[in-house]
Image (cartoon, rainbow, N blue to C red):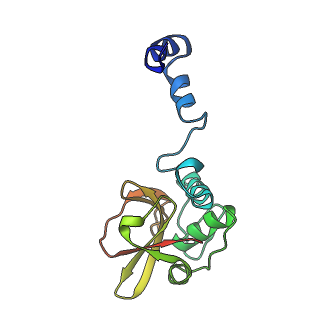
Amino acid sequence: MSAQTHVPSLLSRAGTASVLLAAVGGTMLAPGAVSEAHAQPAAAKALNVAASKKGAPYKYGASGPHRFDCSGLTAFSYKKAGKALPRSAQQQYNRTRHIAASSRKRGDLVFFHSGNRVYHVGIYAGAGKIWHSPKSGQVVRLQRIWSKSVWYGRVG
């Protein structure tokens, strides 16, 4: 019996949710999160940590575990993945390996800049979206990249 003919019987016996859960390796993922099979282990873990902080309030200078500014979220996420990053978005940009947009992968850092000055950072989630802590009055969320003035960096 082929896998295709086996699926309807699985659906009828186990229910759609169970089969879908099994299809992703038994792990439920937050939107924009990735399994370790789809990214470098530290990058995948950092991305999943950032996604797990969805809804955490922004606070200037905060680096978790319950409140974050933009670079605080990226530093916290990568620290949980076993990689140290400096505190500010500019310092993080200076520390990463700079890559082209065409080479970006889930878990890479996305740096928003004005001229040569980096002013914001998030973690690339794929499909043109990032996990980030936007600004005062907002919360950690998944959002489409809204600017073309971005650079990408890979944490080594």
Residue furthest out toward the left: 148
What residue lies at 37% left-to-right and 68% top-to-bottom? 101
What residue lies at 42% left-to-right and 55% top-to-bottom? 126
Residue furthest out toward the bottom: 116
Q: How many marks?
A: 0
What is the quadrant of residue 148 in the picture?
bottom left
Percent coordinates x, y for residue 61 in the rendering: 59, 77
Front-lying residue, 59 or 83: 83
126 left or right of 69 in image? left
Front-lying residue, 107 or 102: 102
Percent coordinates x, y for residue 146 in the rendering: 32, 65
What residue lies at 52% left-to-right and 84% top-to-bottom? 94
What is the quadrant of residue 152 in the picture?
bottom left
Percent coordinates x, y for residue 90 in the rendering: 50, 83
Quarter of the picture containing the C terminus is bottom right
Against 6, is 149 above or below?
below
63 left or right of 113 in image? right
Against 48, is 9 above or below?
above
What residue lies at 57% left-to-right and 29% top-to-bottom? 22
Percent coordinates x, y for residue 70 in the rendering: 51, 70
Front-lying residue, 20 or 156: 156
Against 15, is 113 above or below?
below
